[in-house]
Image (spheres, rainbow, N blue to C red):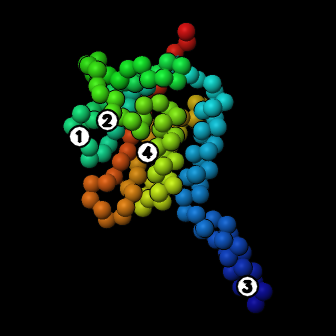
Amino acid sequence: MVRRIMPFGLSLVLCSVSCGDPLGADRDQLAESQARWGAQGVATYEFDVRISCFCVAASYGSVTISVDNRQVVSVVRTDSGTPVDSQYFQGVLTVERMFATLRHFLDAKPAFFTASYDRRWGFPTSLGVDPIRNAADDEYGFTVLAFRTITR
């Protein structure tokens, strides 16, 4: 009888720790990755990113974003170098903005959330989120295709 009670009791304890916040592991991973990124001290870099959403056509395709001293310098089409209006890429203009975007979606308790992070640098490499289950066209995501630090 004790054998049956112990596993059940242990299950209750574990569930009370992890079941309270189904996104708790995602929050922890975000915090750890953001700390890793902060420890790197990278302020000047560029990256190629593609957004996935039901957005305006101007946001389709990949763009290269250049950041100098944590300030956006340019946003251009990766394939042509043509400048792009940065308003369509607000959530991914800098690594700090990417972290803020992930945190925003986590705080909203989405129906689905997945993110991955660069093991060395800590920056987000992808996001996939469905804010509201069964709502049409509300999904959002991004993928960092390339990342380069710039030394001056």
Report the quarter where the C terminus lies: top right
- Circle 4 sits on which residue? 127
Dot placed on the residue nearer the N-terminal end, 2 or 4: 2
Q: Position of residue 11 (x, y in %)?
A: 67, 75
Three-letter amino acid code at the position of disc 4: Leu
- Circle 2 sits on which residue? 88
Three-letter amino acid code at the position of disc 3: Ile
Query: Is residue 106 shown above or below 6?
Result: above
Q: Position of residue 83 (x, y in %)?
A: 28, 20
State the separation of the CA atoms marked 2 and 4.
16 Å
State the separation of the CA atoms marked 1 and 3.
57 Å
C-beta proximity under 8 Å, tags 1 and 2: yes
State the separation of the CA atoms marked 3 and 2.
56 Å
Q: Is residue 147 left or right of residue 82?
A: right
Report the quarter where the N terminus lies: bottom right
Q: Which residue occupies the extreme bottom position in the image? A: 1
Tell me, yes or no, if residue 50 can be seen here.
no
- Circle 3 sits on which residue? 5
C-beta proximity under 8 Å, tags 4 and 1: no
Residue shown at 21% from the left, 37% from the top: 57
Please give the label number shown on residue 28. none
Q: Secondary structure at mark 2?
A: helix
- Circle 1 sits on which residue? 56
Mark 3, other Cα within 10 Å: few <14 / some 14–19 / many ≥20: few
Three-letter amino acid code at the position of disc 2: Tyr
Residue shown at 59% from the left, 57% from the top: 24
Nearest to viewer (mark 3 / mark 4) = 4
Dot placed on the residue nearer the N-terminal end, 3 or 4: 3
